[in-house]
Image (cartoon, helix red, strand yellow):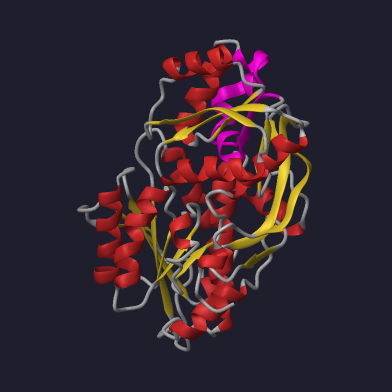
Amino acid sequence: MFKTLLGAVGTAIIMGAAIVAPSQADAQNRIKIGLITTLSGPNAVLGREIVDGFALGVRHSDGRLGGIETEVVQGDDQFRPDTGRELAQRMVERDRVDIVTGVVFSNILLAVADPVLRARSNPFVISANAGPSEFAGADCNPNFFVASWPNDGTHEAAGQHAQNAGIRRVYLMAPNYPAGRDALAGFKRFFRGEVVGEVYTQLGQTDYAAELAALRAARPDATYIFYPGGMGVAYIRQYSQLGLIQQIPLIAPSFSADQTILPGVGEAALGVFASTFWSESLDNPANRRFVTDFEAAYNRIPSPYAAQAYDTARLIDSAVRAVNGNVANRDGLRAAIRAANFQSVRGPFRFNRNQFPIQNYYLTQIERDARGRLVMAMRGTIFENRGDAYVEQCRMPG
């Protein structure tokens, strides 16, 4: 059963009937999930990918995560931390959700996590996207999991790629919010060359004329950006329109060169290198099934956001099955989530001591597939079994 909360103060409406009614034997077992994501404005495409990927994961469990009745309460954070916080508080206090997931942006996740982790009902946060460094280190929490990546993971891989490629001088740009700062910190952790510019723009900004003029004047060997959603479409279009794409190679993480970006950018993205933890081209059984069924259901290629959300649903399914549907057994459920006993679409996946992922990171390049569509084609592995830079600060036992 899916419900939607219309912003922070809207009423709940039914989006669909329960797919499978509970039997008498499991009538007392039910899991409620609060899915808070961005469904308004230019970044709504990211939230839609989260919703659709998670829904497919539920569907692959016959509508019953862990074999029990599943209800998803969906809320639009409207790209505002205060709205996200209000939704989270309402979900844990009124709806009594067991798990909150779905948040796209780190500044919103930081606001959402507070009321969830303080709730007396002891619910969990399982992030399907944002992986703020604040929760990876000293502030790690036994009820906070990240099923995607640490914020700086793909950016560390991009920095290593730039280093491997022999790039000497690079210009860095990202939005000024937690994930943007984590992104550039991650890139610099592995890039040993000269950073000739490090620019943080307003979150949600879509006009980069002044910043691109300064970039051109700096004459770097390459540019590295982190701009998700509508920001990325606007940036790459303007970068190309100014002729910079031919003069200064552009490197990006997958979030600035994936299926939420490529249809809006088109030819300008061809040849761009992108670091990622997942690609639609990754060849393993779980990913082949996911990509095929996602395209059939939604008539588009999935993005990393959809892949993460799908994995989140599969993770929850595996954990609920491990406790035989008894989600009130929070200690058992926590241990089962940590075990991550599911087949990830990204390949190897396990949780680190801080409950952030240990996984591979790959190099992709934008090219056309056999049907002429722009895709992230695999070029190799940058890191194997990479965790994060903050785990040693986390005091939780391993």
Q: Residue 190's spot in the image, x, y percent?
A: 66, 44
Q: Residue 124's spot in the image, x, y percent?
A: 42, 71
Residue 305 against residue 213 in the figure, above or below: below
For the record, the magenta segment spans: 244-270
Q: Is residue 240 left or right of residue 211?
A: right
Q: Residue 49's spot in the image, x, y percent?
A: 51, 46
Residue 339 located within the stretch drawn in magenta: no
Q: Is residue 46 visible?
A: yes
| Closer to the camera in the image, 198 or 141 | 198
Q: Is residue 364 left or right of residue 51?
A: right
Residue at image location 67% in from the left, 14% down from the top: 246
Q: Is residue 366 left or right of residue 311?
A: right
Quadrant including the N terminus = bottom left
Residue at image location 56% in from the left, 43% down from the top: 298
Residue at image location 22% in from the left, 56% down from the top: 11
Q: Is residue 376 visible?
A: no
Quadrant including the C terminus = bottom right
Residue 211 against residue 102 in the figure, above or below: above
| Closer to the camera in the image, 315 or 159 | 159
Q: From this viewpoint, which residue is outermost toward the bottom?
A: 25
> Splitting the image into 4 quarters, where does residue 350 fall?
bottom right
Residue at image location 35% in from the left, 70% down from the top: 117
Q: Residue 19's spot in the image, x, y percent?
A: 47, 66
